[in-house]
Image: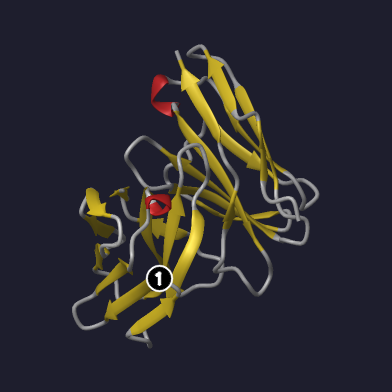
């Protein structure tokens, strides 16, 4: 119940295409769902986040779609660029202040030029 | 704001030796987290401090692991009697009061136990 399941494990997208990464969870006590981006040799960096009372959030080329009834959320990267090539992690947090994030296993995205 | 700093970046040690890592969080951040990341996996939570108090520890944090944040500023993570299974990237993150949701990660310490 504490897991966040992420798919696919890897993804190859042409430059200009749409990258879609999916995550699913079981615990309805999760109340915050961020996506992190990690480049080799660096720590993860927050990309975009959503709360379950919102179905969609958009920041630039990045959009989170959230389906509360299905307990699923996804990251969409529009107009994917080679610079977007990185590992992406979804995460979730229990509704307690300060409680740590639970991360998915990651998706390695390669955007070909 | 120089970001979260971790030292050393890499550590190679022999099985059975003790190692200590240091994390300097962003100066105004009162919350500090330690995570462990192995190849092909997401970060796994180890422990969390609010100021100098260690408020939460994962079951992953065995008796050989100890973390401190003595003055509510920098933190150390010590692993005693290292095992090959301890080989991983150890990540530190910090967040500010009221913004606990946004974690800022350091670049990590890569530990290799031979």
Q: Decide if residue B78 is on the left or right side of residue A56.
A: right
Which colour style is shown? Answer: secondary structure
The picture places residue B31, in percent across and down from the top left corner, at 66, 59
Disc 1 crowd, CA 10 A, few/some/many (<14, 14-19, 20+): few
Q: Quadrant of the C terminus of chain B?
A: top left
Placement of A36 over or under A71, stated as above or below: above
Q: Decide if residue B57 is on the left or right side of residue B67.
A: left
Which residue was labeled with disc 1? A61
Q: Decide if residue A58 is on the left or right side of residue A1.
A: right
The residue shown at (38%, 50%) is A82
Q: Nearer the viewer, residue A105 or A99?
A: A105
Q: Nearer the viewer, residue B90 or A100?
A: B90
Q: Secondary structure at mark 1?
A: loop
Point out the residue furthest to the right here. Answer: B71
The residue shown at (26%, 82%) is A68
The picture places residue B69, in percent across and down from the top left corner, at 72, 46
Placement of B74 over or under B94, stated as above or below: above
The residue shown at (43%, 51%) is A83
Point out the residue furthest to the front here. Answer: A113
> In the rendered image, which quarter is residue A20 located in?
bottom left
Q: How many marks?
A: 1
Q: Quadrant of the N terminus of chain B?
A: bottom right
- Chain name for mark 1: A
The picture places residue B92, in percent across and down from the top left corner, at 59, 46
Q: Nearer the viewer, residue A55 or B50?
A: A55
The residue shown at (41%, 79%) is A58
Q: Nearer the viewer, residue B76 or A13?
A: A13
Q: Decide if residue B36 is on the left or right side of residue A109.
A: right
The picture places residue A13, in percent across and down from the top left corner, at 24, 54
> In the rendered image, which quarter is residue B95 located in?
bottom right
């Amino acid at each position: 119940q504490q897991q966040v399941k992420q798919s696919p494990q890897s993804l190859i997208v042409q430059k200009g295409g749409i990258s879609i990464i999916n995550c699913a969870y079981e615990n309805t006590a999760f109340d915050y769902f961020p996506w992190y981006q990690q480049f080799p040799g660096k720590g993860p960096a927050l990309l975009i986040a959503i709360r379950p009372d919102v179905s969609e959030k958009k920041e630039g080329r990045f959009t989170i779609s959230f389906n509360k009834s299905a307990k699923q959320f996804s990251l969409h990267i529009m107009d994917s660029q080679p610079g977007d090539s990185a590992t992406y992690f979804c995460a979730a947090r229990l509704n307690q202040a300060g409680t740590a994030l639970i991360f998915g296993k990651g998706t390695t995205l390669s955007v070909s030029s | 704001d120089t970001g979260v700093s971790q030292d050393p970046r890499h550590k190679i040690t022999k099985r059975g030796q003790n190692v200590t890592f240091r994390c300097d969080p962003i100066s105004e951040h009162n919350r500090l987290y330690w995570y462990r990341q192995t190849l092909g996996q997401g970060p796994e939570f180890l422990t969390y401090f609010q100021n100098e108090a260690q408020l939460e520890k994962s079951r992953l944090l065995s008796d050989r692991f100890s973390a401190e944040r003595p003055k509510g500023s920098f933190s150390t993570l010590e692993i005693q009697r290292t095992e090959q299974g301890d080989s991983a990237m150890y990540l530190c993150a910090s967040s500010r009061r009221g913004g606990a949701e946004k974690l800022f990660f350091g670049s990590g310490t890569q530990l290799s136990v031979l």
